[in-house]
Amino acid sequence: MLSVSRRVRQKVIAAAAVAVLLAGGALAAVSATGQSSARKHSAREVDGARATRVGAQRHLQVLFASSHSVGTVAAGYLGLAPSKLQAELHSGKTLAQLAAASAGKTEAGLVAALVAAKQQRFDKAVVAGELTAARRAKRQARLQRRIARLVRRDFA
């Protein structure tokens, strides 16, 4: 029984040594040619760009998900149809650029309108018992900064 255990142990050690040698040889070959790291890097760049594009498109869809969504409120403030605003955002313009291009509208005014609409939704959620006052306060503390970032975001 002892000899079987020793034999099995020797085989396992030998197999591990062969695996280490093969892995080391493959690593040395890859390091010498430098191909693998460049491929991985370019693949990450492509995947990252694709993920960013898909993420921006998904975020744009969420902006216009309902009649009281951020996109709809922004469209109302800017005097545009939601579909027209969505097309403008998809073409590469930001909400801030669209506000600056609209007569009598400003980026600060757009941010204020969006913050007011969100705060109104928070208040309704608290009254309905869907949100605690503490969570509302926490969300309101971040709201101005988040909306300001959203207004300057590129969705293309």
Image (cartoon, helix red, strand yellow):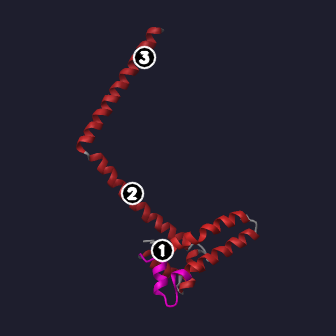
Q: Looking at the picture, does residue 89 appear above or below residue 103? A: above
Q: Determine whether, in the image, residue 64 is placed left or right of residue 93.
A: right
Q: Residues within 10 Å of mark 1 (few under 14, many from 20)?
A: some
Which is nearer the N-term, disc 3 or disc 2? 3
Describe the element under mark 3 as helix, strand or loop: helix
- Amino acid, disc 3: Val
What residue span does the magenta drawing correspond to? 92-109
> Would residue 143 be visible to someone looking at this image?
yes
Magenta highlight on residue 105: yes
Q: For the point 52% across and 90% down, which residue is it?
A: 104
Badge 3 vs badge 2, beta-carbon distance below 8 Å? no
**Tag 1 residue:** 152
- Amino acid, disc 2: Asp
Q: Determine whether, in the image, residue 65 is placed left or right of residue 48.
A: right
- Amino acid, disc 1: Arg
Q: Point out the image quarter for the C terminus.
A: bottom left
Label ID, residue 47:
2
Q: Residues within 10 Å of mark 2 (few under 14, many from 20)?
A: few
Q: For the point 41% across and 13% down, which residue is it?
A: 7
Q: For the point 51% across and 71% down, which residue is it?
A: 149
Pinpoint residue 36: horizontal percent, then vertical percent: 30, 46
Label ID, residue 71:
none
State how many labels appear: 3
Which is nearer the N-term, disc 2 or disc 1? 2
**Tag 3 residue:** 8
Magenta highlight on residue 131: no
Pinpoint residue 33: horizontal percent, then vertical percent: 23, 43
